[in-house]
Amino acid sequence: MIYPIIFVSLIIFLLLYFRIADKYNIVDKPNERSSHTVITLRGGGVVYWFTALLLLLQHAETTYLFFAGITIVSAVSFWDDIQSLSNKVRLLAHFTAITIIFYQLGVFSLLPVWSLPILYVIAIGIINAYNFMDGINGITGLYTLAVLGALLYVNYYVIAFTHADLIVYPILASIAFLFFNYRKKAKCFAGDVGSIAIAFWIIFLLLELILKSGSLIWALFLIVYGVDTVCTIFHRLYLKQNIFEAHRLHFYQVLSNEYKIQHRIVALLYALLQGVLSATVILLYKKIDELVTILIVVTPLLLLYLIKFYLLRNNSKI
């Protein structure tokens, strides 16, 4: 079985990267908006790009375009981790990479022209949302495992939509990354290169599944991040804040920073909640109307999110 070899290779790669990051001072320095308090190595999420490279070596004929796309977003994101880039450069990279996988998956011939701008906005929005949510130890790795675990189950037992390695490899990368990140004092952070690369990978898989099944219901595999991100944006607009500036108003930030709940517990709760909701989607798939499934999944999540406002108001009185 090649998977143990892949996993060991990923651990070795991360250990080598840590030496490079330490030598060249690739670190994350905390500020008043951060959820961490000590300087930590940054960019450990580059392991997702390296995983894509290993995948390319195994399945070159079917993954070379995907690899080109993830290389573009990873390179620009890693550069941004070291030296801040303009939003225009990042947006151009995301647009280019998304265009590549749209071409690979046949989106331009399968979907009507009017839907393409909407799909671009959603895809780039997911990439940035995944990045915004990467703020505490373990959250990106654990949430990614929840999403990929659901996709792997669907691929094996519901509808075969892709080669299993496309799902198993990033699962192995997430476990390797979590070994160094899911700690009270993390050895490294994912950085933009990690959160954006794995978001790109998940978009590719979800889009492949949606096109294969003809159902949008699978987008609910990202609903926890989606609700937190969208509701937080509206909250910040209500407060007349610049939504592109760093902040501490995501639900996970309120729980971690204001109520001092351990990062690892909050991250685990996010992953478990997404896992339960994904299992609900799988259970209800083709059994009831999709709109009803969406209401069953989203409504309680929105009600749960309202707790944040109570917590913020209560904390302001302390």
Image (cartoon, grey):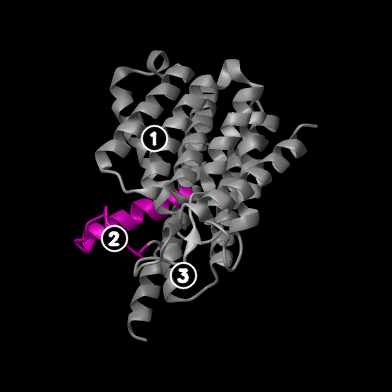
Residue 256: assigned label: none
Which residue is situated farthest in the bottom direction here? 318
The answer to whether residue 312 shows anywhere in this view is yes
The kind of residue tagged 2 is His
Compare marks 2 and 1 and give the one earlier in the sequence: 1
Foreground label between 3 and 2: 3
Is 127 drawn above or below residue 272 in the view shown? above
Q: Which secondary structure, mark 2? A: helix
Q: Position of residue 210 (x, y in %)?
A: 50, 28
Q: Which secondary structure, mark 3? A: helix
Which residue is situated farthest in the right direction here? 1
Quarter of the rendering occupied by the N terminus: top right
Q: Spatial distance from mark 3 to mark 2, Cα to Cα?
A: 16 Å
Which residue is situated farthest in the top direction here? 109
Residue 123: assigned label: 1
Compare marks 3 and 2 and give the one earlier in the sequence: 2
What's the magenta region? 223-249
Q: Cβ–Cβ below 8 Å for labels 1 and 3?
A: no
Q: Spatial distance from mark 1 to mark 3, Cα to Cα?
A: 28 Å
Q: Which secondary structure, mark 1? A: helix
Point 35% across, 27% down: residue: 96
Residue beneath disc 3: 255
Residue 239 among those drawn in magenta? yes
The answer to whether residue 286 shows anywhere in this view is no
Residue beneath disc 2: 235
Q: Position of residue 169 (x, y in %)?
A: 64, 36
Quarter of the rendering occupied by the C terminus: bottom left
Tell me if mark 3 has few (under 14), some (14-19) or many (20+) residues whose alpha carbon lies within 10 angstroms of its own. Answer: some
Point 47% across, 65% down: residue: 39
Side of 14 where 295 appears, left or right: left
